[in-house]
């Protein structure tokens, strides 16, 4: 079964506690939390106070996806507010190896995210140190975008690298995931599926999460 990570970006911020409770009651194991700075991506989402509050309202894993420049500046801050997994972008990291080590030293699981144009091969020399690779299946910055089909090819290649270098690696897919593409994503090698708009726009989000879980 894949790990399901509902993206809170698509939640109703006026009724956030309700949406958190909905995820708490569901088969989702993780909360996916998208932090955007308006510089690395052309959008600004939410930051520390929201994540800190969510951490108080759930025992589930907090999977934090940083879409910000110089993410290394905030590693200890995200640990302090409850992040369990901290994922930063390859494209935003000049000293990626150092940042990965810093995340692990803080006691979090370390992830690296790749934009659609970035090949998985760039991770060859750090993959053994990683807990997770997040493949963006849309251009980062917004929820509700169309899934990019080339993602399957990237998962295949990453799955080959995983088998050789790091069998425990979690392959996470983020963007445009829904119950139509989830089965093929899982069959291709995805271990974790992020879903925002598909879950929170569903008539019954809890049931939708269950359908994703049984993909
Ligand atoms: C996009 C974010 C995603 C987003 C996914 O930049 O990284 O996590 O919330 O939203 P959907 O599932 O609507 O594509
Ligand atoms: Zn994300």
Image (cartoon, grey):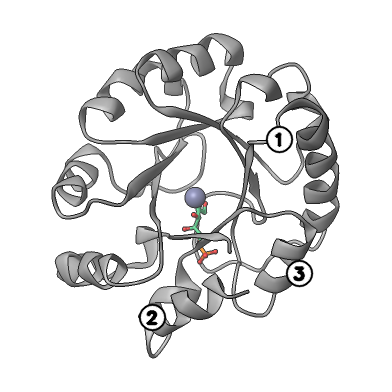
Q: Which residue is mark 2?
A: 205
Number of the front mark, 2 or 1? 1
Secondary structure found at label 1: loop
Q: Is residue 158 visible?
A: yes
Which residue is located at x 35 percent, y 17 percent? 106
Residue 37 is situated, as x and y percent measured from the top left of the image, at 39, 37
Q: Is residue 94 visible?
A: no
Q: Which residue is mark 1?
A: 167
Marks 2 and 1, how far apart at CA: 32 Å
Marks 2 and 3, how far apart at CA: 21 Å
Which residue is located at x 86 percent, y 52 percent? 153
Tell me, yes or no, whether the two marked residues, 2 and 3, touch with CB atoms within 8 Å.
no
Q: State yes or no: Cβ of the residue under disc 3 lies below 8 Å from any atom of ligand 1.
A: no
168 lies above or below 179: above
The one nearer the camera, 141 or 5, is 5
Q: State yes or no: Cβ of the residue under disc 1 lies below 8 Å from any atom of ligand 2.
A: no
Residue 24 is situated, as x and y percent measured from the top left of the image, at 26, 65
Tell me which corner region of the image, top left, top right, bottom left or bottom right, holds residue 105.
top left
Secondary structure found at label 3: helix
The one nearer the camera, 65 or 2, is 2
Tell me which corner region of the image, top left, top right, bottom left or bottom right, holds residue 8.
bottom left
Q: Which residue is mark 3?
A: 184
Marks 3 and 1, how far apart at CA: 20 Å
**How busy is the neighbourhood of tag 3: few (under 14 within 10 Å), some, or many (20 plus)?**
few
The one nearer the camera, 39 or 111, is 111
Tell me which corner region of the image, top left, top right, bottom left or bottom right, holds residue 206.
bottom left
Which residue is located at x 21 percent, y 33 percent? 81
Tell me, yes or no, whether the two marked residues, 2 and 1, touch with CB atoms within 8 Å.
no
Residue 120 is situated, as x and y percent measured from the top left of the image, at 78, 35
The residue at the far bottom in this view is 203
């Amino acid at each position: 079964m894949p790990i399901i990570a509902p993206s809170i970006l698509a939640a109703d911020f006026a009724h956030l506690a309700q949406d958190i409770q909905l995820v708490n009651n569901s088969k989702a194991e993780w909360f996916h939390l998208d932090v955007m700075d308006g510089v690395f991506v052309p959008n600004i989402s939410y930051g520390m106070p929201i994540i800190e509050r969510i951490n108080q309202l759930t025992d589930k894993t907090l999977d934090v996806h940083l879409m910000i420049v110089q993410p290394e500046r905030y590693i200890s801050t995200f640990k302090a507010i409850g992040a369990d997994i901290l994922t930063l972008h390859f494209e935003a990291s000049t000293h990626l190896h150092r940042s990965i080590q810093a995340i692990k030293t803080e006691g979090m699981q370390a992830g690296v995210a790749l934009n659609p144009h970035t090949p998985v091969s760039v991770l060859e020399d750090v993959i053994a140190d990683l807990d997770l690779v997040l493949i963006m299946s849309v251009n980062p910055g917004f929820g509700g975008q169309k899934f990019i089909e080339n993602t399957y090819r990237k998962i295949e290649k990453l799955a080959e690298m995983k088998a050789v270098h790091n069998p425990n690696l979690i392959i996470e897919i983020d963007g445009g995931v829904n119950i139509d593409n989830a089965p093929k994503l899982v069959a291709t090698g995805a271990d974790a599926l992020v879903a925002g708009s598909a879950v929170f726009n569903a008539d019954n989000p809890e049931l939708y999460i269950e359908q994703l879980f049984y993909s």
